[in-house]
Image: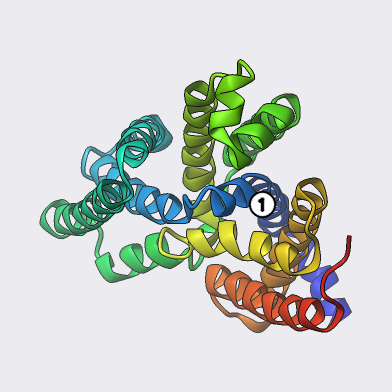
Amino acid sequence: MFEKLALYLQYPFVRYALIVGILIALCSSLFGVTLVLKRYSFIGDGLSHVAFGAMAIAAVLNLTNEMLLVLPLTIISAILLLRSGRKAKIQGDAAIAMISVAALAFGYLLMNLFSASPNLSGDVCTTLFGSTSILTLSRRDVWLCAGLSLAVIVIFILFYNKIFAVTFDEDFSLAAGVNANHYNLLIAVVIAVIIVLAMNLVGSLLISALVIFPALSAMRLFHHFKKVTICSAVLSVVCALLGILISILAGTPVGSTIVAVDVVVFGICYVVGAVTGGFH
């Protein structure tokens, strides 16, 4: 098995997949904890559907760089969802459902009406579940992903204290002079970037799992925000690495394999947390 793995690692596309997978998993886990604690988990799912619809439009327009259209539309949708979500929970949930379902439906409709691809079902499956797209990355894609991932990590480190304050108590943050609205907006934009990046890894339907499962697993083990964040990052990177390696060796879909590993790790963490009561 190790000889086979060493043979595969000689190919650039395999190394690219590992690099991008680890970077995306790390970024997703950092802000995943915040999303779970702020009850914004479904925003990731809604934005992933928006990104799918934007990719369909980009494909119809024959854009050579889909990111030029997908990223701005996803960021705009993130801002709209955030603003609607602050008014009332029901309105926020309704907005997420409307935008996600509409984007998914129109995206698939456009791909059916205007697609020139002879394998439409394969294209849709790859976009939704990330079947092989992570293994077809170019050097430019890797550098773009690395740059955006680095920006996400730097933003999280620089604004860690503010993100922590906004995550747990917005009213206290406002009283302490922190502009919670600005930092909520920052979180929404960063999450939109992560969603767009993660589509190549796990596909639009499985992105929420990549964001949520490591955070939930870490919360089973620790009860301190910083420890949960660090543990979530470690678990996410390990799961992504194992998932990609298993998919390469076993020939299984990359996205589904990563999520399956995340689910298994969550089960293990749940049992360990139930037995030990968590670590402090």
The percent position of residue 238, horizontal first and vertical second, equals 78, 64
The reply, left or right, for residue 173 in relation to residue 71 is right
Q: Quadrant of the N terminus?
A: bottom right
The percent position of residue 129, horizontal first and vertical second, equals 44, 67
Query: What residue is drawn where x is 18% and y is 58%?
Result: 105
Along the line of sight, which residue is nearer the eye, 197 or 234? 234
Rendered image quadrant of residue 276: bottom right
Residue receiving disc 1: 29
Disc 1 residue type?
Ser
Task: Please determine whether, in this image, residue 207 is positioned above or below residue 275.
Answer: above
The reply, left or right, for residue 256 in relation to residue 72 is right
Instruction: Look at the image and tell me whether residue 28 can be seen.
Output: no
Task: Please determine whether, in this image, residue 250 is positioned above or below residue 45.
Answer: below
Task: Please determine whether, in this image, residue 94 is positioned above or below residue 221.
Answer: above
The percent position of residue 199, horizontal first and vertical second, equals 48, 53
Along the line of sight, which residue is nearer the eye, 113 or 161? 161
Query: What residue is drawn where x is 33% and y is 52%?
Result: 52
Q: Quadrant of the C terminus?
A: bottom right
Q: Which scheme is used to colour this image of the protein?
A: rainbow
The percent position of residue 74, horizontal first and vertical second, equals 37, 38
